[in-house]
Image (spheres, rainbow, N blue to C red):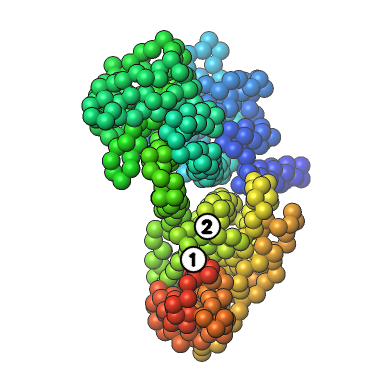
Amino acid sequence: MSKSTIVTGIAEIEALSDAVSAIASSSLDEDGLCYYVYECISRLVDTYDFQLGIFDGKEYVMKVRVQNRNLLPVSRYLIEGGIIGWMRDTGKNLLVYDFETELANLPARPSYISSNPPRSGIFVPLRNGEQVIGAIVVQSMQPNRYNEAQLRTLSIIAHQAAAGIQNARALARERRRVQQLELVNEVARQTQALLHLDELLPQLVHAIQRIFGYYAVALCLPTPEGDKIVIQSATNRDIVGIALQRGEGVIGSAFATSRMVVVDDIAQDMRYVATSALPNTRSEVAVPLFIENQIVGVMDLESERLAAFTRDDQRYLELLARQVAIAIEDARLYEAEQLAQRLRQEVELAESIQVSFLPKQLPNKTGWELGAAWRAARHVGGDFYDVFELRRELEHQYGLAIADVAGKGVPAALFMALARTLLRAVAFTNRSPADALMRVNDLILADSQADIFVTMLYAIWNPDTGQVLMGNAGHNPALLVTQNGTVRAIKSPGIALGVLDEAFIGSTSFTMQPNEVLLLYTDGITEAIRADQTDFGVERLQAVLRQSRHLSAQTIADEILKAVNQFVGTEPAFDDQTMLVLKRVS
């Protein structure tokens, strides 16, 4: 092999490594990431004809389409066989040296018809686990333009690109959930002071339209007899006063069934009642308004786009409908009583959302036990813990995290949701704990306008080797109980996230031995105060941990909470109390 060939090979490997690393660490949205993948591949192979597409049901959406270096508009088409359909069904790669000589032996034939078709190409699926989410295709007008090495190169990039796209989607969904909750609360804030129905309803419809951008908004209330529902207020005044029988129109159907009615195309739905006042309506959703399981009205939203109300939208519309129903009920009752009821509804909603962010179950790994406890000082709080699987090469490792947001109540809970979302998104890029925490800090400062910070401890645990790699951003040091009962604080330098633009986070690593216990906790445990203003403290925590180390991981967590409860007596909790216990049993 010549020296120039070796140098070229090394350069290609370095370019591939750079491309994979850049894709893994990218914080771009899905569309931006897709184009960035094209840029990376174009530096490695001939991309005269390039496409990166994503499967959307039975359709194939070409996010990036380049021909002769010309970027074409995003397009979609129905998948009807072809090589793309074959890849979606099999998840296999395909290398074609020359279509003219190999066409008869290919597992599938191209679905396009062209007088001057490509001569060679590489086809690789975008796979996320067992799911094929899309495809990358490069083709050339020259035969034998690609080889096996380039096929392997594109397969590696496609694997990382699929993970990056899924991460971008997850981050977008989580951000959207937080943003939607904030918008729902904004509607409530803008109308909470109005206690007269004739003032409240117009303010509500215009606030919803202004904040969410809908084409038309209407609020409808039933007649005293309950046989009809009347449009009481709307962004278009011409439809105010229209009365609909139960089951009549989209609104009447929602009122009759007490269920959300979604119409993707009003031209194809016989229930739609046309009106010249809203000529541009293309899709509609009618959402029942409930108070204590009793329907008290219907919120109607209309859009100028077909199928504008997705499944994700429908989830937050239910939350919005709850807020609207509460606001209407407030206007019917006296101020103080209804104000308290609305606050309880908001808190219950926030609590259910916050609880949904906690792990549904902890991993069950042979030779290990995990236990956890989470108790908010109020109904909602700023503490959280998380455990999630990290796939790294051939090893299955896990991310362990615990955090404490500075603050209480709904603002802290919202910030907690943001911090958890960002950590998960960054963790799946296979960064070290310290690097992951520093990246989360950058994203928090870029995303959040709130003057709130969070302490966070993040560790990567390898159950096969027992190794724990840990980074700490200003959080309480973890406690490690050794086999002989010695308790050691795991310390490393680091500042809370959301404080400084360039936060340095240190790291440490250790290997847990059989019968050793690792405790991650928030300061709500050690700073629990009894009537004489004495706090529980680290020494008491270490004593309980030492005494209970022979018990199961979950029992250890329960014993610590029990000891804290006995210590504080009847004093109310001042801060959230959260723990994560990891025990190696063999």
Q: Give the residue drawn at x 55%, y 29%.
A: 210
Query: Alpha-carbon neighbours of circle 2 within 10 Å: few (<14), some, or many (≥20)?
Result: some
- Name the one closer to the observer, 207 or 159: 207
Residue 360's place in the image compared with 335, above or below, is below
Q: Give the residue drawn at x 40%, y 20%.
A: 240
Can the viewer see residue 229?
yes
Amino acid type at image mark 1: Ala
> What residue is disc 1 on?
377
Res 7 → quadrant? top right
Q: Who comes first in sequence, dot 2 or dot 1?
A: 1
Name the secondary structure under disc 2. Answer: helix
- Decide if residue 433 is on the left or right side of residue 55: right
> What residue is disc 2 on?
409
Q: Position of residue 233 (x, y in %)?
A: 42, 25
The quarter of the picture where the C terminus appears is bottom left
Can the viewer see residue 86?
no
Res 401 → quadrant? bottom right
Residue 445: mark: none
Q: Give the residue drawn at x 59%, y 60%.
A: 407
Residue 493's place in the image compared with 452, above or below, is below
- Decide if residue 459 is on the left or right side of residue 377: right
- Name the one closer to the observer, 550 or 300: 300
Name the secondary structure under disc 1. Answer: loop
Q: How many marks?
A: 2
Amino acid type at image mark 2: Gly
C-alpha separation, residue under disc 2 versus residue under disc 1? 9 Å
Query: Alpha-carbon neighbours of circle 1 within 10 Å: few (<14), some, or many (≥20)?
Result: some
Q: Position of residue 400 (x, y in %)?
A: 52, 64
Name the residue furthest bottom.
484
